[in-house]
Image (cartoon, rainbow, N blue to C red):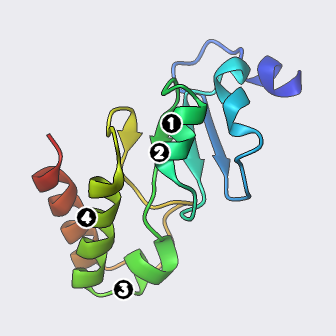
Amino acid sequence: PYFKELYDCKLSVKFLHNDANCMEMVQFLPDMGVNLFNMGFDTDLNQLKELTKNKVTMLGNIPPRDVLAQGSPAEVKEATLNLLHGLKDNSRVIFSCGGGMPPGVSSENLAIFIETVKRFTP
């Protein structure tokens, strides 16, 4: 009931961030009023989209620290391509890292991530 009251506000973006295991609760996100969800990077976006009946926009989902911050540009590109090609449907997805942007991400890694998303999404 608390989340429903919280997300009942008259804002257009109703964002929830949860790095913990969310598979037991994600089906309730649409009823809670959440319309944008950022999860831990190890969560399967296809499962989340199915459980929410694709009513919630997903924000993610490459590994933030081990890939985006500490990986090489080639590793960032590979992880991004794996994410893009692994999705059954890329509607209602904002491509980002799962769990939030870590410190120390190089401009080069951000650029290759953005370039790869732009190049390989319709």
Alpha-carbon span between mark 4 and mark 2: 15 Å
**Residue 88, image quadrant:** top left
- Give the residue number, with chain letter if any, for mark 1: 49
Alpha-carbon span between mark 4 and mark 1: 19 Å
- Give the residue number, with chain letter if any, for mark 3: 71
**Residue 107, image quadrant:** bottom left
Q: Is residue 46 above or below residue 10?
A: below
Tags 1 and 2 touching, CB below 8 Å = yes
Residue 45: give x, y in percent of width and height.
49, 48
Q: Amino acid at mark 4?
A: Leu
Give the label on residue 81, or none: 4
Label 1 residue SS: helix
Sequence-first disc among 4 and 2: 2
Q: Residue at x 18, y 61 (%)?
A: 116
Sequence-first disc among 1 and 3: 1
How many labels were placed on the picture? 4
Residue 86: give x, y in percent of width and height.
34, 55
Residue at the far left: name it.
119
- Give the residue number, with chain letter if any, for mark 2: 46
Sequence-first disc among 2 and 3: 2
Q: Is residue 90 above or below residue 55?
A: below
Q: Residue at x 73, y 22 (%)?
A: 32
Mark 4 Cα-neighbour bin, 10 Å: few <14, some 14–19, many ≥20: some
Single out the mark in the foreground, 1 or 3.
1
Alpha-carbon span between mark 1 and mark 3: 27 Å
Sequence-first disc among 4 and 1: 1
Q: Amino acid at mark 2?
A: Asn
Tags 1 and 3 touching, CB below 8 Å = no
